């Protein structure tokens, strides 16, 4: 059984190396304070074209609206699940974008109190004869208010893992995915109209990988080794990323709605909108759990596939032969379709038996995830099989072709709305026991087809 240990150890080491960024950078000493990390969206936000004129905005409160507390396994916790500094993060993102002039509104009372103190002090100096003291200039008012908040924090939307152990060598991996959602809306201070609303979600990943060795290396000598790590994506960085993406979306969708524009002109605006809308269309076509969707309006498809055949008859030896398929299908609904298949196969069995057969099948096919880019499907239907039966004379056909029933399953991967790659496996039950020319026993002949092919939709 030693031959099993090497693949197992290889798999465990691979699991560790895939996440080597965390494993190979384990903290062994105190770290000094540093400036905050940036996200991938931070760079995109800072590299946006500059506006024709900065927009004066105010943010009174961008708060946690979830009301959720941290999940702990034992007892209860009064710590919130998400950071409470959403307003500060939003102000920072607005400032970094270069598109907005942010006025202080979160702690407006503190600002007004300090201005009153300054004005009162200067008034006292003027009454004492110091005419150089002047009143403070008026506050800058916001043309647009940004409202919204953190509306959802979903824990454990996806969990899983894997593990194995063999003769004291083993390991395991676990993962958990959470999800945070923010909404951001722009409101005109002139008339109170909601100008634009955007919605952004961000997943938060937690992973744990461990490996261990427990083995007697000699009499009364036991070797025990354990290693592993846990990596949790910081919620603060996930929230920062989501807020920055919301600000980016607000800027570009505002350009599309003619609320504001870049200083570089219409060509840059159009290029920015085209890039954003292409990415937005791709993201909107992806459901939860990264399920990519394909919008397909075509109702017809042609398919060509090649593969292998494995025949089970009365002869003892089983051999692999070729199989090809030409198919046409017509879509009945999002889920169901009817298909017609023409399938040449090679039956090889026994010591030297080889023969070419042809089958025509009619199937009802059902897609389990009809709009997904990667979709499994099932099918079932009747068919006929024979030796060159299409060219035989009518009076001889009863001995040359036989009825059968086939069922199968497949996996369809769509490149786009016109082309897809598919793989299938099917079993065919025939109503004869002499496909290979031998009739023996009480069971009918049957065979399997396995194939890979390409589809064209039109």
Image (spheres, rainbow, N blue to C red):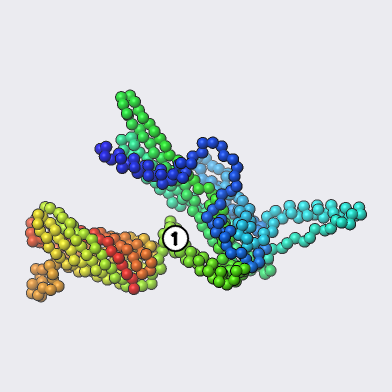
Q: Could you tell me if residue 137 is visible in this image?
A: yes
Question: Residue 441 versus residue 143: which sits nearer the camera?
Answer: 143
Identify the residue under disc 1: 287
Judged left or right of residue 288, residue 244 is: right
The percent coordinates of residue 442 (x first, y second) are 10, 56
Q: Could you tell me if residue 299 is visible in this image?
A: no
In the picture, the quarter occupied by the N terminus is top left
The percent coordinates of residue 34 (x first, y second) are 59, 45
Within 10 Å of disc 1 (Cα), the crowding (few <14, some 14-19, many 20+) is few
Question: Residue 8 versus residue 447: which sits nearer the camera?
Answer: 8
The total number of labels drawn is: 1
Question: Residue 411 versus residue 82: which sits nearer the camera?
Answer: 411
Which quadrant would residue 54 be assigned to in this image?
bottom right
In the depicted structure, whether residue 399 falls above or below residue 18: below
Residue at position x 58%, y 44% in the image: 78
Judged left or right of residue 33, residue 8 is: left
Q: Residue furthest top?
A: 220
Residue at position x 46%, y 45% in the image: 21
In the depicted structure, whether residue 245 falls above or below residue 10: below
Judged left or right of residue 386, residue 90 is: right
Residue at position x 61%, y 53% in the image: 89
Q: Secondary structure at mark 1?
A: strand
In the picture, the quarter occupied by the C terminus is bottom left
The percent coordinates of residue 312 (x first, y second) are 15, 56
The percent coordinates of residue 186 (x first, y second) are 62, 64
Q: Residue furthest right?
A: 129
Residue at position x 55%, y 43% in the image: 77
């Amino acid at each position: 059984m030693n031959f099993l240990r090497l693949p197992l150890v290889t798999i465990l080491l691979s699991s560790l190396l895939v996440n080597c960024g965390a494993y190979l950078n384990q903290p062994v000493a105190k770290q000094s304070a540093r400036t905050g990390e940036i996200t991938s969206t931070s760079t995109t936000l800072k590299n946006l074209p500059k506006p024709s004129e900065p927009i004066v905005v105010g943010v009174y409160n961008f708060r946690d609206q979830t009301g959720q507390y941290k999940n702990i396994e034992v007892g209860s916790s009064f710590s919130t699940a998400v950071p409470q500094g959403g307003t500060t993060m939003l102000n920072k993102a607005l400032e970094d974008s270069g598109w907005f002039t942010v006025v202080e509104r979160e702690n407006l009372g503190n600002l007004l109190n300090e201005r009153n103190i300054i004005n009162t002090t200067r008034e006292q100096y003027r009454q004492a004869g110091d005419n150089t003291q002047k009143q403070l200039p008026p506050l800058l008012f916001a043309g647009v208010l940004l409202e919204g908040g953190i509306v959802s924090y979903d824990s454990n939307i996806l969990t899983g893992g894997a593990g194995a152990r063999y003769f004291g060598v083993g390991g395991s991996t676990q993962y958990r995915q959470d999800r945070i959602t923010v909404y951001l809306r722009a409101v005109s201070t002139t008339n109170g109209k909601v100008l634009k609303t955007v919605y952004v979600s961000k997943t938060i990943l937690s992973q744990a990988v461990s490996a261990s060795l427990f083995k007697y290396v000699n009499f009364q000598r036991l070797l025990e080794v354990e290693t592993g790590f846990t990596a949790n994506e910081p919620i603060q960085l996930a929230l920062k990323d989501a807020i920055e993406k919301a600000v980016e979306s607000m800027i570009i969708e505002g350009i599309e709605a003619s609320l504001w524009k870049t200083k570089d002109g219409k060509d840059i605006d159009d290029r920015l909108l085209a890039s954003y809308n292409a990415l937005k269309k791709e993201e909107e076509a992806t459901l939860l759990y990264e399920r990519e969707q394909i919008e397909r309006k075509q109702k017809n498809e042609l398919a060509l596939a090649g593969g292998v055949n494995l025949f089970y008859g009365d002869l003892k030896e089983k051999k692999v032969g070729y199989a090809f398929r030409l198919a046409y299908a017509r879509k009945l609904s999002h889920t169901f379709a009817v298909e017609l298949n023409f399938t040449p196969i090679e039956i090889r069995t026994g010591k030297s038996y080889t023969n070419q057969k042809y089958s025509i099948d009619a199937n009802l096919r059902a897609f389990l995830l009809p709009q997904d880019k990667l979709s499994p499907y099932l099918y079932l239907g009747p068919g006929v099989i024979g030796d060159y039966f299409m060219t035989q004379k009518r009076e001889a056909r009863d001995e040359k072709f036989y009825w059968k029933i086939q069922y199968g399953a497949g996996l369809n991967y769509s490149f786009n709305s016109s082309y897809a790659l598919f793989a299938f496996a099917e079993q065919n039950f025939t109503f004869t026991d002499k496909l290979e020319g031998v009739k023996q026993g009480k069971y009918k002949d049957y065979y399997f087809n396995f194939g890979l092919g390409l589809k064209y939709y039109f």
